[in-house]
Amino acid sequence: MVTPEKPLTVPRRPRCSRAWRRHLARLPRALFRVGLGRVFGRRVLLLHHEGRATGLDLSVALEVVAYDREGGSWTLASGFGPKADWYQNLRMTPTTVVQSGSRHFAVTAHFLTAEEGGEAMVRYAAARPRTARRLCSFKGFATDGSPDAYRRVGCEIPFVRLDAGPGQLLP
């Protein structure tokens, strides 16, 4: 008589509590508010946006996918898709303000097509391969590390380019 084998149980690391994860997620925004935004360099910016339902001034710290000083723009990816609140709020009110370092800039949001997003993801993966692999893994995208695989992933993620208003000197 054959006995069924018990499935192996792998011990799991204890997870951070929700409260700790919430505090960690809010830490960059708090650092911007106390004037320490420059510790992020050009990698993270603070996006101010108007709540589409409440009209309140909201803010979120986001990683910069691409920074173009000459063109006066930042490119962002909505890692949580088109349902992210900040993304939907920008759709409703595309003119807003960002904080990069300790400086504020008036910007206008331009939503990239899937093809443009694919190309942005390829450039991001070339510049930050480890972070790109982790992002794809976290979001459940299978990738072999090739430009074509990253291009397919980038077509699934919404990207936004924030163009600074004329006459603003970028850092």
Image (tube, rainbow, N blue to C red):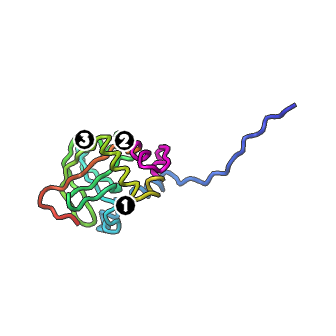
Callout 2: SS: helix
From the image, which quarter does the N terminus lie in? top right
**Residue denoted by label 1:** 28
**Image point 76% across, 40% down: which residue?**
6
Label 1 or label 3, whichever comes before in sequence order:
1
Disc 1 to disc 3: CB gap under 8 Å: no
Q: Residues within 10 Å of mark 2 (few under 14, many from 20)?
A: some
| Nearer to us in this view, 24 or 74 | 74
Which residue reaches farthest right?
Answer: 1
Q: As displayed, is residue 101 above or below residue 112?
A: below
The residue type indicated by label 2 comes to Cys
Cα distance in 3D space between marks 3 and 2? 18 Å
Picture coordinates of residue 108, whole percent (x, y):
19, 49
In the rendered image, residue 159 lying in the magenta stretch gets the answer: no
Picture coordinates of residue 155, whole percent (x, y):
36, 41
Cα distance in 3D space between marks 1 and 3? 24 Å
Q: Is residue 91 visible?
A: yes
The residue type indicated by label 1 comes to Pro
**Residue denoted by label 2:** 155
Which residue reaches farthest left?
Answer: 167
**Residue denoted by label 3:** 91
The residue type indicated by label 3 comes to Arg
Mark whose residue sits in front, 3 or 2 = 2
Mark whose residue sits in front, 2 or 1 = 2
Q: Residues within 10 Å of mark 1 (few under 14, many from 20)?
A: many
Label 2 or label 1, whichever comes before in sequence order:
1
Q: Which residues are magenta?
A: 134-152
From the image, which quarter does the C terminus lie in? bottom left
